[in-house]
Image: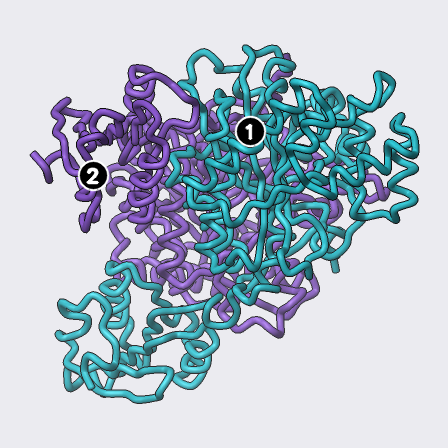
Chain colours: A cyan, B purple
């Protein structure tokens, strides 16, 4: 009767279980590193994005005039909002500020596999540190979470580059070179034909020979050669910083998930140092899974004190594709599980409620009949929600002060004294009474 | 530089910690009853609300035309969306369907204490049962959660009423009575002067004597008297259902949080049976905290099979006021806690990283220096994040293969052998080594 909007998704319990598991893993990892959860508005002044986010994002924004005549936008990304928040309370917050939040964002994009108009991200950001430890820490948070989810270095890699290496190198080709356009060209290099890539570099101000030279240097991936070729402090310091970050990832135990990748550029304009993109190591998910990087100038551009910053933002639409490809996406009983179903046969509500409460007090997932259904219908339902154990509370059993415990996997069942269930047991099953 | 929109909030970590604790308690309670998490879009066709939600909500909607020319609205409530979802997959879903979800909603309202334009709710719904057990279960989910949060029956009460009692009673006053207008009048009775209340009832089609009679009956609260006065099956059955629901809350262990309250009406038009409103028992939070009720006709009105339904939706803006009033809102160390800060003195990153990783593997919250700061600055930071234990990894100690463990509450500290920390201990503190 009413249709769902294109690019928006309904998450029924099975699909939601997988996304919840992934979000919980990232949030739990961030919490272990001392990141604190924040939450932010879904609407902001549209002008903020016009000023800070670049044309591509602004063109895709859900923006409109609210009832108070304000020009507002549904947030297409988090970074401008957190920058605003840091500026608002800058002096009160002890540095470094380490924030994490999971929420939806909205962009009116072309819908395709792994890309929707409403998409969830967890943003993990450190404000107030320019040290390579901060860059490495946000990488470690996500790498640890991915390992917790069952992924290995065969499954994912963080491609790491640096704006001072790529941008610095581009700048050495001449004063007329538009380095931002050059970076955007490199960002597209893997997605377009070589001819088109060279044309983009020429548009950015390089000669055709320089384009070929740049291509060779980036493909070669030799940092010493690049630093020597460029001969500028900017590139030399970028190379040092890049190496320092990779050295810290070693100490943090996540070096194996990081790859130096000089062609990784990231489209966003506000990055100033290291940039990261996460890819499927097996190459089946062809697109970047998500990315991040350092944005040292943004807080100051919002009117705050100069505050170096670095962040990363796993997105769940593409991450889902990766988890599915890697075979670690929960399905069936992994997605929907129930510890106990308390089946009611006859007028036994009081006793059934007592059993269910006792099990819930032990923190188990316990469903029971709330629809006055038959024995068979209840058993089918228990099966449909993957109940592990069914506790049958029946009038006849109760006359003997007993209940029946049924193992749903084997079908075995046994009677046990009512006062013995659950008794002192933390998680009683059929095996405890067999 | 950019201001936050009126009625929208930034949640910094301290405020967020309290809301997270409340949301987790409600979600965990729902999970224990076998409710499954779903997630839903932030935008829907505006027409859905125009058809289903009533004028008040539609007037306050954030609605606009998207880039594809669709007339869309930021969701002002969840119920129409879940009704759409139930209809979309009605036959595939095993009944009863028990869903829970936490998300923001948006209404362009007058901003006041506990009321914002963006607000979070957890919706807890059962579809496919008309039995009183379902009504009682959604009440029990929330009551259990509130007790987990530290609230008692001195703090909150669910006022329970029934549309067939109130609406049925209104209908007995004459065929010309507009029962929906009458219900809305009763809904306002506590907020307006008696004269105005009587005027509203007269507007709904009652005589002045009937208005006074109704007022007496509702205030009296005697269900038998009301059933006898009305003399209709509808009212008699409503009374029976209301009593049955309260009887089930007894078995579910939450009767003490429920009060029969015949003047509780709930504004929404789609309720058909029991209605609930949660109030501050101490009366300091004067407004309804949130509500819920039965809506048996909605799914069918969306084109689905007839599917009885009941739901409740704790909202966190008003719940926060209640938790604060009751003195169970986390502040300071309860809101921001850190198990360990690993302090680095000198060139010790590798060893400090090993210690931090070992503690994180034990699932603790562990912060360490990522900004190259001094000993004193790190100690201040550890204090600011309420670190319980500081592990000082220093060059001098390490020369003797030792680290220093400092209890931040007492200030006591002691040296321990590096290989002994954390060793086999799950959560080592100063006391283990003193």
* Identity of the residue drawn at 58% across and 22% down: A83
Give the image quarter of residue B86: bottom right
Nearer to the camera, B29 or B164: B29
Relative to A151, A270 lies left or right = right
Q: Can residue B58 be seen in the rendering of this structure?
A: yes
Residue B119 screen position, x and y as percent: 53, 35
Counting labels gives 2
For label 2, the residue is: B418
Q: Position of residue B168 (x, y in %)?
A: 50, 55
Up/down of B32 relative to A124, above or below? below
Above or below: residue B30 compared with residue B419: below
Along the line of sight, which residue is nearer the eye, A153 or A394? A153
Q: Dot 2, crowdedness within 10 Å: few (<14), some or many (≥20)?
A: some
Query: Which of labels 1 and 2 is toward the front?
Result: 2
Q: Chain of mark 2?
A: B
Q: Are marks 1 and 2 in contact (CB under 8 Å)?
A: no
Query: In the image shown, does A116 or B259 lie closer to the viewer?
Result: A116
Instruction: Give the residue displayed 64% in from the left and 70% down from the top.
Output: B305
Residue for point 61% across, 39% down: A160
Q: Quadrant of the C terminus of chain B?
A: top left
Query: Which residue is located at x 60 percent, y 13 percent?
Result: A300
Q: Tell me the quarter of the picture where residue A36 sits.
A: top left
**Secondary structure under the numbered disc 1 in the rendered image:** strand
What is the crowding at mark 1: few (fewer than 14 residues within 10 Å), some, or many (at least 20)?
many
Looking at the image, which is closer to me, A396 or B19?
B19
Report the disc number at residue A310. Answer: 1
């Amino acid at each position: 009767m009413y249709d769902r909007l294109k690019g928006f998704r309904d998450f029924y319990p099975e699909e939601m279980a997988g996304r919840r598991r992934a979000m919980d893993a990232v949030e739990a990892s961030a919490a272990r590193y001392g990141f604190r959860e924040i939450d932010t508005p879904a609407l902001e002044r549209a002008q903020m994005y016009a000023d800070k986010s670049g044309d591509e994002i602004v063109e895709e924004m859900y923006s409109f005039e609210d009832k108070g005549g304000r020009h507002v936008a549904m947030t297409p990304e988090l970074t401008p909002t957190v920058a605003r928040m840091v500026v608002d309370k800058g002096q009160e917050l002890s540095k470094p500020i380490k924030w994490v939040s999971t929420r939806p964002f909205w962009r009116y994009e072309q819908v395709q596999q792994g890309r929707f108009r409403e998409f969830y991200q967890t943003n993990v950001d450190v404000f107030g540190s320019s040290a390579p430890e901060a860059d490495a820490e946000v990488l470690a948070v996500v790498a640890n979470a991915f390992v917790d989810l069952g992924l290995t270095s065969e499954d994912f890699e963080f491609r790491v580059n640096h704006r001072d290496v790529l941008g610095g190198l581009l700048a050495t080709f001449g004063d007329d070179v538009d380095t931002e356009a050059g970076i955007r060209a490199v960002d597209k290099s893997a997605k377009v034909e070589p001819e088109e890539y060279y044309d983009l570099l020429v548009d950015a101000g390089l000669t055709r020979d320089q384009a070929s030279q740049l291509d060779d240097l980036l493909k070669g991936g030799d940092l010493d050669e690049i630093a020597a070729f460029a001969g500028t402090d900017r590139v030399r310091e970028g190379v040092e910083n890049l190496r320092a970050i990779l050295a810290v990832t070693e100490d943090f135990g996540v070096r194996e998930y990081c790859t130096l990748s000089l062609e990784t550029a990231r489209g966003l304009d506000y990055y100033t140092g290291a940039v990261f993109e996460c890819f499927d190591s097996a190459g089946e998910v062809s697109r970047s899974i998500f990315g991040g990087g350092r944005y040292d100038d943004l807080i100051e551009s919002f009117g705050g004190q100069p505050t170096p910053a670095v962040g990363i933002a796993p997105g769940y639409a593409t991450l889902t594709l990766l988890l599915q490809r890697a075979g670690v996406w929960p399905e069936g009983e992994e997605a929907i599980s129930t510890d106990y179903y308390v089946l009611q046969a006859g007028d036994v509500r009081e006793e059934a409620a007592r059993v269910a409460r006792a099990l819930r007090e032990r923190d188990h997932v316990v469903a029971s009949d709330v629809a006055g259904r038959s024995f068979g219908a209840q058993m089918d339902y228990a099966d449909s929600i993957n109940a592990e154990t069914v506790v049958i509370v029946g009038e006849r059993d109760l006359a003997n002060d007993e209940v029946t415990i049924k193992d749903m996997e084997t079908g075995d069942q046994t009677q046990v004294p009512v006062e013995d269930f659950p008794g002192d047991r933390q998680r009683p099953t059929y095996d405890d009474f067999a």
